Amino acid sequence: MASTTPRQLVAVLDFGAQYGQLIARRIRDLHVYSEIFPCDVSAAELADAAPAAIVLSGGPASVYAEDAPSIDPAVLELGVPVLGFCYGHQVTAVTLGGEVAHSEVGEYGPAELRPEGESALFEGTPASQVVWMSHRDSVSRVPEGFRVTASTEACPVAAMEDAERRIYTTQFHPEVRHTECGRRILENFLFGVCGLERDWSMDDLAETLVAQFREQVGDDRVILALSGGVDSSVVAALGARAVGRQMTCVFVNHGLLRAGEPEQVEEVFTHQFDVDFIHVHAEERYAELLAGVTEPEEKRRRIGTQFWKEFFAVAQQLERDGRPVRYLAQGTIYPDIIESGARKTGGKASTIKSHHNLIPFPEGVHFDLVEPLDHFFKDEVRELGLALGLPEHIVFRQPFPGPGLAIRVIGEVTPEKLEILRGADAVVREELDAYNRRLFEETGERNSEHSCWQYFAVLPDIRSVGVMGDERTYQRPVIVRAVESSDAMTADWAKLPYEVLGRISSRVVAEVPGVNRVAYDVTPKPPATIEWE
């Protein structure tokens, strides 16, 4: 770890939970630095990291399963305060001599929690509060020295503690938003029990990541997979500060970008960064590759495979020029890893969709990866971008998938469909950019209660009957997607004013040839994903 790591470190031991990284993020939200460690880390290795506190995550396994993850018992003897959630609650119990049993009735979702007696963990919280549960096994007997501090109707040991040893555990998940006092519980542990200080900020993270980037790369050359989006732009800023012109920014133009974006990308990354910039014009190759393809995963696979081929060709040319490349930098962020089922800290998650920057290398590619953002969420990446001095129009740019408009054109991607979608998407973004600006002026918040976090147009593979100029039309509908979110893990559809939706509809139909209908998607994530494919 680089020397810029803050003095106070909270170590999160990950037992394979979908929300393991979310715990670390919630702690960072409170201005305390946290990092993920594998659950099987030895006590000696953990002691070397000198954590000020340890948090044990949840996980999908049963503690009595044959291959259930366990913890080095000596971790609980380090004298460092411990907080465990869900599986972390149960593994603490069995490790210290308690018992866990299979319950007759499981708890999934909201439950009413009743704290019992005085507990530092629940200080300042109400006598009845809603928490988020997800379990069937539960602690049936607490270890010696522990006492029960909260229960629910279905879970007699919803929380327990050994205050003398400073070990506190809960069956519920304080890290999720659905636990109404979750933030206060984390604050009580970090600042009340552990006595930590709010000594960390995104400026600290920027220094840490720059130092780690420089340390990993050394004197070797790096290629950056630059799309011009927020994530890869932040990596570009990190790399520029860390290694300068050792990094070559390669922009693969696959012809699937939004209106005006290739020009904007080249303008920004040839004038604001002291790095090599290569613009690869691959539009025709991608068009041929996608002809006749309709299945979403096949689109992603072909786009991802070609992506690597384009990079490999550039790397080969650099090597012929006497500038061999060892590292490939990418803007992979944590939700990408979760959705792809590609956990790096243990456990497995089901694959929701593949991501172009997580597809394995083709045969012969020799790059080592530099992925400085793979433990962070989108809004954290935006904050980091500001701390690195990136302009706001880059930092707050709309999220855009690697496969581009190919996965917003449902069915086969054709030049005609791309032209329609680019025009419609430009109208949607122009109107909702203006809507968000008005909200920002009124509230001073970039992500206020009613602002949109992501918005775009989708072109379905159907036609609809309409009437324009007293004549029947048979043209394409456009679907508008606008969501509210902070981290892309969950999202709700944006409750846009009718006048905004009406203006979008009128403009799209009037300004985009081939469109005669506009619909609005009102499905949250889950059950839907933000993108349509």
Image: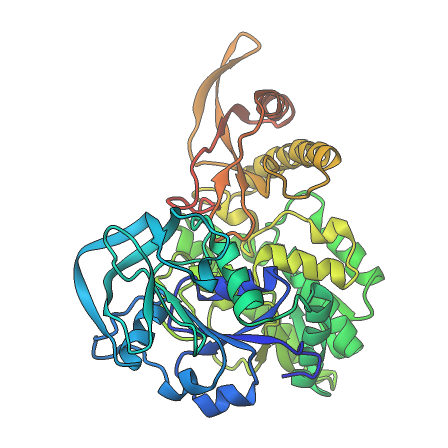
The coloring applied to the image is rainbow
Q: Residue at coordinates 75% horizontally, 77% vertically from top-left? A: 242
- In the image, 250: left or right of 120? right
Residue 401, percent across and down? Answer: 55, 53
Residue placed most toward the observer, 395 or 256? 395
Residue 224, percent across and down? Answer: 66, 70
**Is 64 situated above or below 289?**
below
Q: How many marks?
A: 0
Residue placed most toward the observer, 281 or 343? 343
Q: Residue at coordinates 74% horizontally, 83% vertically from top-left? A: 321
For this orientation, the residue located farthest to the front is 117
Residue 58, percent across and down? Answer: 37, 66
Residue 331, percent across and down? Answer: 61, 65
Q: Residue at coordinates 47% horizontally, 63% vertically from top-left? A: 120
For this orientation, the residue located farthest to the left is 104
Q: Quadrant of residue 206?
A: bottom right
Q: Residue at coordinates 79% horizontally, 71% vertically from top-left? A: 275
For this orientation, the residue located farthest to the top is 470
Residue placed most toward the observer, 292 or 445? 445
The quarter in which the N terminus is drawn is bottom right
- In the image, 69: left or right of 341? left
Is residue 282 shown to the viewer in this render? no
For this orientation, the residue located farthest to the right is 271
Is residue 378 shown to the viewer in this render? yes
**Is 178 situated above or below 246?**
above
